[in-house]
Image: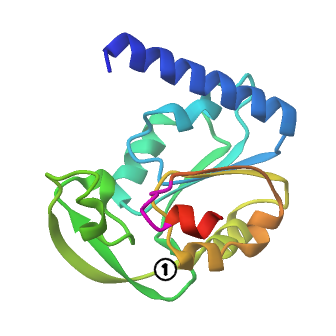
Amino acid sequence: MMKNESSMNTQAGSSMLSVLWQLLQPQAMVHLGMGRGLGVTNFWLSLPQVPNALIVEADNARCESLAEKLLAYPQVVCQTAVVADGSEADFFYTSHPDENGLYPSENLVSLWPQLRFTSRAKVATVSLDALVRETMAKASYAVIIDMLPTAALWNGAVNTLASTRLLLVRVRLDENTEASLT
């Protein structure tokens, strides 16, 4: 894809998401895995009124970097946490830090053949419901999950999802997806 095409796709995606925001009118944003703060899923930062928002990033250095970039938005908070169901979990580190997470890195090689597993660590997780309850007022939410979620994330997000008006999720489809959707 040429650079202009990519830019047009990003603009079209941002425009579509802005329209959905206006139609569904969530009151607050929860953004899991914002990474470096780039890409179409960050459309909400260009809304006329940036909402109260909770950004959750597993990497503390990235969270600190995002907090610096978002100083103009005091209603936006970045918290370092690994989101799942509140139990201990394996966290996978790869040769590409954007893909570190709870999703097993060996399952990503078909998408990125150059990606390499570097290490694994046991980490404490927190549920999305607990994070939202501790840091945000009760509201209707837009939730962006810009990471590859695991079943444990969904198990710990029941209450938040019940109050969600707009949900954007990054997924990986595989050969079993079609069978499970039919």
Residue 72 makes an appearance in the image: no
The x and y percentages for residue 34 are 47, 47
In the image, which residues are magenta? Answer: 171-176
**Residue at horizontal 41%, vertical 15%?**
5
**Residue at horizontal 21%, vertical 62%?**
94
**Depth order, front residue of 38/134:** 38
Category of crowding for the residue at label 1, using alpha-carbon neighbours closer than 10 angstroms: few (below 14), some (14–19), many (at least 20): many
The residue furthest top is 4
Is the residue 44 above or below the residue 140 in the image?
above
The x and y percentages for residue 65 are 38, 44
**Residue at horizontal 26%, vertical 54%?**
97
| Residue 175 on the magenta span | yes
The x and y percentages for residue 64 are 40, 50
Amino acid type at mark 1: Thr
User: Quadrant where the N terminus lies?
Assistant: top left
Please give left or right for residue 73 compared with residue 1 in the image: right
User: Quadrant where the C terminus lies?
Assistant: bottom right
Residue 121 makes an appearance in the image: yes
**Depth order, front residue of 166/50:** 166
| Residue 12 on the magenta span | no
**Depth order, front residue of 17/67:** 17
Is the residue 12 above or below the residue 158 in the image?
above
Number of marks present in the image shown: 1
Tell me the quarter of the picture where residue 89 sits: bottom left
The residue furthest bottom is 87
Is the residue 75 above or below the residue 11 in the image?
below
Residue tagged by mark 1?
125
